[in-house]
Image (spheres, helix red, strand yellow):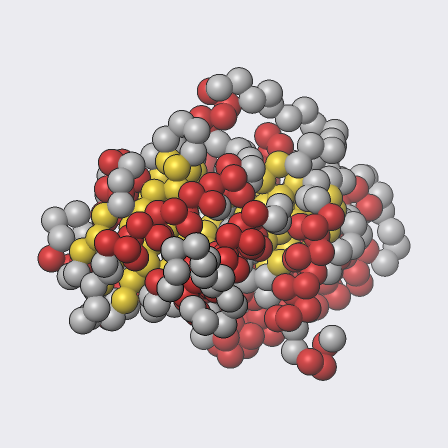
Amino acid sequence: MSPARAKIHVKGDEPRLDAVMDFVAFAAKPRPLVSLLDEAPRKLAEIVRADVCSLYIVEGDGETLVMRGNVGFPERALGQVRLKVGEGITGTAVEMLRPVSVGEAGAHDSYRHFPELGEERFPVFAAVPILGRRGALGAVTAQRRAGVPFGTRDVELLAALAATISAGVRNAELIDSIRERAGTPSRKTGGGTRRVMLPGRPAHPGRVVGAIAALKRPPARPKQTRHVDDGARLKAAFESTDKALRALERRAEALGVDASFLGTYVQIVNDARLRSETLKLVDGGMGAAEAIGKIVRRVAKAAVVENSPFLEERARDIEDLCDALVMIASSDPRAELPTRAVLVADQLTVFDVLVSARSKPVGIALSDRGAGPRTEALVALLGIAAVVGVDGLFKWASDGDIALLDADHGLLVLNPSRSEVASAREARKRAAPSSER
């Protein structure tokens, strides 16, 4: 070819170059973080011919790496796989601010194995940091099956392409302690318009948009209202609650969910003494809510006197169930919730599955106090998008705020942009069965 004659690398001649150009064009356009998390790993995997590609983001105290984007591993890995900076091959790349590659990951001194991912099938490993203005914002990792290690050109290309997505990650504005130490003002209650993104852990998949509403319980001091049919209402509440609990047990069994704690609630609602004493108080002139409240106080007092952990847990279950009975027997508008809301709370209880769910919420976000096996079971029974362990939930979220709950990646976005809302709705549309479209 003559030196004066330039070569035009036309589309279609060089597939890898085409893929690189496509990725650069993709990364150059402003887009919602969730779109970046969904698409960037897939495109990068295609470019470097990887079986697995993951995108990690630095969160929390600046020392934690969380997998928020991935192709090749089960979806449940998102938001759950976490490393400390300096831990594992990925953490080493972030700590050193340099790429790390290895032909047999399991033999590397820093290797951190996640058996639930089955990643031993992909031992060829490369990790590059996503560099920001001040250190690393995260990392991109690529993995292959044994036999074809990543060459220098692969690592160079991966590092260069990772740099193109740094702006998208940086603009995510995840609220964390680093920003707060740097002087980010705390959110005042009462709503607002600032877009805020809070990280958590996915508990049940889905992407939904709705208004924030805090979970409520019946008032500590119920209205002293007596209805002539309170006795009949209370009896009906006991019966309907028993049927609902047994239906939940059957649903849990069908889903393969361990919800054995529901058996305790069934025993409580069928406890002859509890029923008779409550109905006796109602027959004596008390309102249903007042009578149930008196029984709960009596049980709680006994648990304190005995100083028994078992009785204390039993008392909490009885209180939770009695709250449900109060709402079912004598609906109090002070504990009602708006429909189609994203519910926020510290904890999820059986009360919420029996009562709060009647408002047909679209999703639920729980603080770091909400994690645990019982929560996992209740979330599965609700069957709605859920994120747990949301950092700073009550510092930033207020009733009435519009929120995007992305339970696929484990993120709660307050006052999301129009493009984020559109992206979430499109993702939900794709995930819905054709009969629901």
Visible in this render: residue 372?
Answer: no
Left-right relation of 98 to 80? left
> Residue shown at 56%/75% (left/top)?
251
Q: Nearer the viewer, residue 325 or 409?
A: 409
Looking at the image, which residue is at 72% across and 76% down? Answer: 436
Q: How many marks?
A: 0
Is residue 99 something that shows in the picture? yes
Where does residue 212 sit, x and y in percent of width and height? 70, 44
Q: Give the residue furthest to the right.
A: 228
- 198 relative position to 53: left or right: right
Work out which residue is located at the far top of the displayed protein and give it: 183
Nearer to the camera, 197 or 71: 71
Measuring from the top left, give residue 190's x and y in whole percent. Answer: 74, 29
Q: Is residue 61 above or below residue 426?
A: above
Residue at position x 51%, y 52% in the image: 24
In the rendered image, which quarter contains the N terminus?
bottom left
Q: Horizontal and vertical percent for residue 293?
A: 66, 43
Which is nearer the eye, 387 or 19?
Answer: 19
In this rendering, is residue 7 above or below 175? below
Instruction: List x then y, in percent, for residue 265.
Output: 54, 61
